[in-house]
Image (spheres, rainbow, N blue to C red):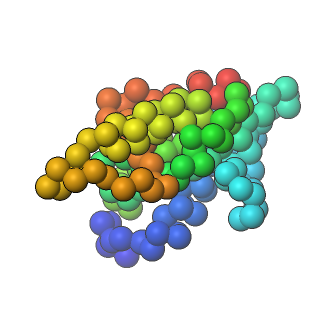
């Protein structure tokens, strides 16, 4: 495969989950990838003494822009111990970039961003039609490599 070859979306997601689990393991945490039917949770991570556990939903992109699509459920799926790890894979030879974000922050930002999008006129000044798609961005890298936020 060429260093810049595009992989199918389903494999992109799977790759992101494994990269996140590997990065957590590399940092000394216990990480388990959940079964495919576990809604909203891709990785369960625990510190070594088992005193703190967190759940993680992974969103992975091969694109260079720091924006990931979510659905409207991300506005309500909030818990103190639930996080998102947004992964930028880049080229095959690049190390992935990880944006670690508490679920409360994701919910607040996607809700506000969606409201702003709805209030902003679209093409020809037409009103945008509401839909379930949401966009999370971390353009300023505020959450880049913020593994400390997991509290593990």
**Is residue 12 positioned above or below 25 on the image?**
below
* Residue at (40, 26) in percent of width and height: 142
Residue farthest toward the right in the current orientation of the protein: 50
- Of 59 and 131, nearer the camera is 131
Query: Image height check: is 23 above or below 51?
Result: below
Q: Residue at image x 52%, y 36%?
A: 106
The percent position of residue 2, horizontal first and vertical second, equals 32, 72
In the foreground, 145 or 37:
37
Residue under the image location 52 percent in, 69 percent down: 11
Quadrant assignment for the N terminus: bottom left
Write down the quadrant of residue 113 in the picture.
top left
Percent across and percent down for residue 93 are 37, 58
Picture quadrant where residue 17 is located: bottom right
Is 46 displayed left or right of 85 in the figure?
right
Q: Position of residue 50 (x, y in %)?
A: 85, 31
Look at the image and tell me in which quarter the C terminus lies: top right
**Is residue 84 visible to the viewer in this orientation of the structure?**
no
**Residue at left offset 53%, top offset 70%:** 10
């Amino acid at each position: 495969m060429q260093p810049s070859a595009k992989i199918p979306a389903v494999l992109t997601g799977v790759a992101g989950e494994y990269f996140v689990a590997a990065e957590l393991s590399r940092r000394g945490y216990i990480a388990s990838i959940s079964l495919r039917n576990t809604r909203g949770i891709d990785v369960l991570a625990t510190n070594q003494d088992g005193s703190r556990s967190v759940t993680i939903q992974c969103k992975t992109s091969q694109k260079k822009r720091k924006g990931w699509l979510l659905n409207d459920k991300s506005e309500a799926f909030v818990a103190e111990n639930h996080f998102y790890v947004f992964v930028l894979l880049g080229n095959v030879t690049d190390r992935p970039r990880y944006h670690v974000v508490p679920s409360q922050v994701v919910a607040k930002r996607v809700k506000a961003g969606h409201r702003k999008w709805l209030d902003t006129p679209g093409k020809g000044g037409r009103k945008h039609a509401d839909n379930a798609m949401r966009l999370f961005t971390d353009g300023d890298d505020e959450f880049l490599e913020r593994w400390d936020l997991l509290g593990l």
